[in-house]
């Protein structure tokens, strides 16, 4: 790789090289990722398209619940990349090599954020499109807003990228093996309207409805529902996008602190 003269050009050159390298890795894994996602869509189709309606689930809840499951796919996808990165820090040390390249810390982080966002996009597009055509065959998409959907998607994958990078640098490998799910993912999973729209939660318990608003994944799930089913369905997608960006700003600060604590403790 031949670097051009000038700090900005060095950053751009190294950044593009890092992204291309990761894209090659993603390309080598692409077939398996597509197979895994298609299997996920298939099993979710059986669950939401057959079993739940057969057990008496109201049809108007089927697609909103499926969108909740799609929203939470971000955690499972991000977890895979998270452990790849933290194993690298613990063993191969390739990230340490990348830090010796003529690239600023900002552009270094941007390369990782970019790859998280690309990975999440590749693996979420199929469930969203597949579910829209299979599970929601009886749903009217007259209220679908491509603009709001794109905005929610970008805000969601940006937040998730920063969240998982923060976790990567904030905790040790051993701590994550023991505590990642019970202390971080389970609370995000439970205090979130995945299996029911937020408006239904508010009807049952306004207090729980308010607690759900503290969870950033609430805005991912409800943002998807609002983009597909109309801005009046629950939380307005514009609000979801704004809140997710606010959470992202918070994680930028947490990531900065966690990175220097682990990689440059002096």
Image (cartoon, rainbow, N blue to C red):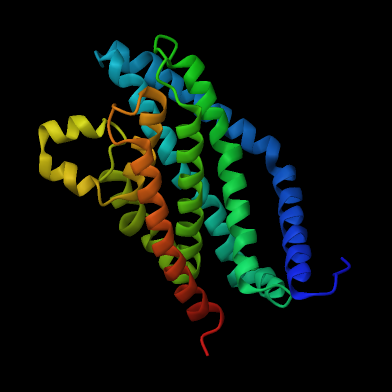
Quarter placement of the N terminus: bottom right
Res 171 seen here:
no
Residue at 61 percent of width and 61 percent of height: 110
Res 247 seen here:
yes
The number of discs equals: 0
Residue at 36 percent of width and 30 percent of height: 226
Residue at 57 percent of width and 48 percent of height: 117
Residue at 50 percent of width and 28 percent of height: 146
Along the line of sight, the residue nearer the viewer: 145 or 259: 145
- The image position of residue 162, as x and y in percent, is 49, 58
User: Left of 205 or right of it: where is 240?
Assistant: right
Along the line of sight, the residue nearer the viewer: 173 or 132: 132
Of all residues shown, which one is farthest toward the bottom? 266
Along the line of sight, the residue nearer the viewer: 156 or 70: 156
Based on the displayed image, in which of its 4 quarters is residue 125 positioned? top right
- The image position of residue 190, as x and y in percent, is 27, 44
User: Left of 119 or right of it: where is 1?
Assistant: right
Against 251, is 26 above or below? above
- The image position of residue 147, as x and y in percent, is 49, 32
Based on the displayed image, in which of its 4 quarters is residue 143 positioned? top left
Against 34, is 210 above or below? below
- The image position of residue 114, as x and y in percent, is 62, 53
Of all residues shown, which one is farthest toward the right? 2
């Amino acid at each position: 790789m031949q670097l051009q003269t000038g700090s900005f050009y060095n950053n751009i050159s190294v950044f593009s090289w890092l992204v291309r390298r990761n894209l090659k890795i993603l390309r080598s894994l692409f077939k398996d990722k597509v197979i895994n996602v298609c299997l996920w869509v298939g099993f979710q189709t059986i669950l939401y398209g057959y079993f739940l309606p057969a057990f008496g689930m109201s049809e108007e809840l089927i697609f909103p619940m499926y969108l909740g499951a799609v929203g939470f796919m971000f955690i499972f996808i991000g977890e895979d990349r998270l452990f790849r990165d933290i194993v690298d820090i613990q063993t191969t040390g390739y990230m340490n090599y990348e830090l010796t390249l003529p690239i600023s810390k900002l552009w270094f982080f941007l390369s990782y954020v970019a790859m998280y966002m690309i990975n999440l996009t590749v693996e979420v597009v199929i469930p969203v499109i597949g579910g829209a055509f299979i599970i929601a065959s009886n749903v009217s998409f007259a209220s679908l807003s491509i603009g709001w959907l794109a905005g929610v998607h970008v805000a969601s994958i940006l937040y998730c990228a920063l969240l998982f990078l923060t976790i990567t640098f904030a905790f040790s490998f051993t701590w994550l093996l023991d505590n990642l799910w019970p202390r971080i993912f389970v609370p995000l999973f439970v205090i979130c309207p995945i299996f029911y729209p937020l408006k239904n939660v508010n009807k049952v318990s306004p207090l729980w409805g308010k607690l759900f608003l503290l969870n950033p994944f609430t805005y991912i799930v409800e943002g998807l529902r609002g983009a597909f089913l109309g801005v009046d369905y629950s939380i307005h997608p514009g609000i979801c996008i704004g809140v997710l960006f606010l959470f992202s700003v918070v994680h930028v600060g947490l990531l900065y602190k966690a990175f220097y604590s682990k990689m440059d403790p002096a």
